[in-house]
Image: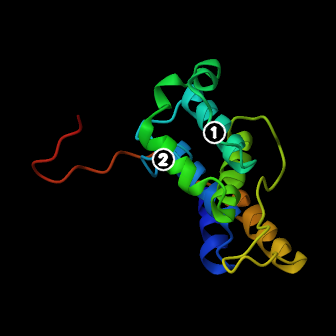
Amino acid sequence: MEHGLLWCYVERGKSPEVHGAQCALAWVGGVHPTAPATADVAAPSRWRAMGELIVCGAVSRGEPYPEPGWWREAGIARLDSAERRRWWGQWSAYGWTTAIADGAGRALSWALGFIDDMPPVLPRHLEDGSRAGADLRGECAAILREALDRPLPDRSGPPIPLPSGHTLT
């Protein structure tokens, strides 16, 4: 799914919703080390993904930066910081940011099993701010379905030998 979203983003109009979804799934899948909403550099876990989903929801709705009690009640108090507060104040009302957060939230909801929409995200907007048309949304849906239908490579064979001097730690 992450690869299909990346392909849609690069080849079909750079939709901010698709970009957010691709970033979220790249983090969940271990391809990218930075969480999509908080920019926290932490390995994904169910708890961390839930924290990201909560922040994505707030940002996508254009809500003001939450007070410390909100972060505590959401179970993500350690993610509250002055730097995050500054970022939120500067970017959270910007259309691209809310659209990216919407896409990331939809992808995280899908990855966590809260929604089973297939595909979980389609472009709503394009890079220039215009609305994505039905034809483009249909093309992206076909790309994502095709990506999911591809078989995964066989990884049951013997491991590839490491180059001389390299070890796994």
- The single residue placed furthest to the left in the displayed view is 165
**Residue 30 can be seen, yes or no:** yes
- Name the amino acid, label 1: Val
- For label 2, the crowd category at 10 Å Cα-Cα, with few meaning under 14, some 14 to 19 and many 20 or more, is few
Q: Label 1, label 2: how many angstroms apart (C-alpha)?
A: 15 Å
Looking at marks 1 and 2 on the same chain, the residue that comes earlier in the sequence is marked by 1
Q: Please give the name of the residue rendered at 65% of the width and 64% of the height, measured from the top-left corner.
A: 96
Q: Which of 95 and 5 is in front in this view?
A: 95
Q: Is residue 161 left or right of residue 5?
A: left
In the image: residue 39, left or right of residue 103: left
- At horizontal 65% and vertical 50% (from top left) the residue drawn is 104
Q: Where is residue 81 in the image (x, y as percent from the top left)?
A: 45, 34
> Quick one: SS at disc 2?
helix
Judging by the rendered image, the residue that carries numbered circle 1 is 55
What residue sits right under mark 2 in the picture? 86
Q: Is residue 14 left or right of residue 113?
A: left
**Residue 145 at what x, y percent from top left?**
77, 62
The answer to whether residue 30 is left or right of residue 5 is left
